[in-house]
Amino acid sequence: MVSVIIPALNESRTIGDVVDFVRRDERVSEVIVVDDGSVDDTAELARAAGAVVVTSTMLGKGASMADGLWHARHEIVLYLDADISGLHPDLIRRMTGPLLAGEADFVKARFSRSGGRVTTLTARPLLRVFFPELAHIEQPLGGIIAARRSLLRNLQFETDYGVDIGLLLDAAAHGARIVEVDVGHIAHDSHSLDVLGDMAMQVVRTIFDRAARGHRFSIKHVREVQEVERCMQAEMAVALERLGQIQRLALIVLEGVVVPGSFAELLALRTNRMHELAAAREEAAGMPLEDRLRRVGAVFAGVPQQEVEQVARTMPLSPGAAETVVALRKAGYRV
């Protein structure tokens, strides 16, 4: 059986429908709405819909989630936001299925929605830097979470908007099996820019806190992760995937076409590596093109990115190169 916990603050417009939706599922044996000090009819409407209503001991979404956990009677716990609509009829089965089957300890919902600016601009970039093993999670801030009560009771509940990302990071630190399941499209109330700003700050604070605890908060670590990501993005398969669906694609060789000279030689001159470059070219003479390029590239391992960029900025372009690229783009090509 499943305990559903719904933290709520002034959600009289939607709370009744959310409770009704949950109670229709045979897996659910209790619905707990944790009222965070609402001044509208949220609590009354939740009771009327059949939920058990408790009052949060402290203001904040995370505090409400923690209070609900200690009232829950069952090992499988599902958290839902009170301001959502358009829920897929099979949502509860999708979220709790991996737990009931013994395949997971912590389940996050993956869904389509409009907005998600804090996720896109803050949460996911920071996860890529500090927690790359969780970078595949598409909705790290989503409030739809299912987990084992025994696991949740060992995690720290932030009192504010940092709670969802904090639980995810803590679950990973505890070695929990984490999966993300698709629950379709979710309609969420949009927030003002002021609220989004507060949310972003709370999310950043939580990620930095967990990174510091895990001894990941260092400039060296950030640079290492950025370099791994940069190399991944340079792979052709990754570059083509990021381009998306395109009808026309132009790939132009840099040396001898866009620029008249050798980028490698100019970089070697700037970094005093001409001897190493000559030796690498001689060694790679009989290799396939990709292997030759990798061997030459290895000469410049450790060269700061700023040095590489400075050489690129100072190289002259071949006559007509810029005009050709612009013309191709105007003709509908990705270049």
Image (tube, rainbow, N blue to C red):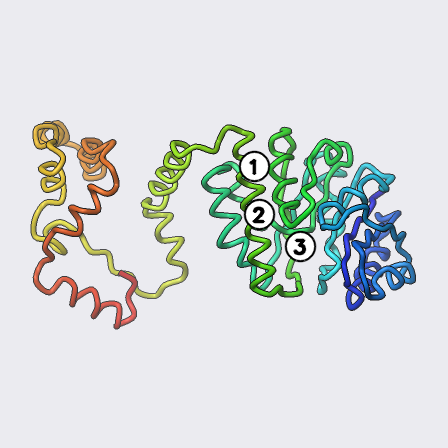
Measured Cα–Cα span from mark 3 to mark 2: 23 Å
Mark 2, Cα crowd under 10 Å, few <14 / some 14-19 / many 20+, is many
| Above or below, 127 relative to 224 | below
The kind of secondary structure element at disc 2 is helix
Mark 3, Cα crowd under 10 Å, few <14 / some 14-19 / many 20+, is many
Task: Specify the label residue 15 is tagged with.
Answer: none
Residue type at mark 2 is Val
Q: Where does the image place residue 143, in percent across and percent down from the top left?
A: 68, 51
Q: Residue at x 35, y 51 (%)?
A: 239
- Mark 3–mark 1 CB contact (< 8 Å): no
The kind of secondary structure element at disc 1 is helix
Mark closest to the chain's N terminus, 3 or 2: 3
Q: Quadrant of the image for the C terminus?
A: bottom left
Measured Cα–Cα span from mark 1 to mark 2: 10 Å
- Which one is closest to the eye, mark 3 or mark 2? 2
Q: In this rendering, would 156 be left or right of 198? A: right
Residue ID for mark 3: 183
Residue ID for mark 1: 209
Mark closest to the chain's N terminus, 1 or 2: 2
Task: Specify the label residue 203 is tagged with.
Answer: 2
Residue type at mark 3 is Val
Measured Cα–Cα span from mark 3 to mark 1: 30 Å
Q: Residue at x 41, y 37 (%)?
A: 222
- Mark 3–mark 2 CB contact (< 8 Å): no
In this rendered view, identify the residue nearer to me: 41 or 136.
Answer: 41
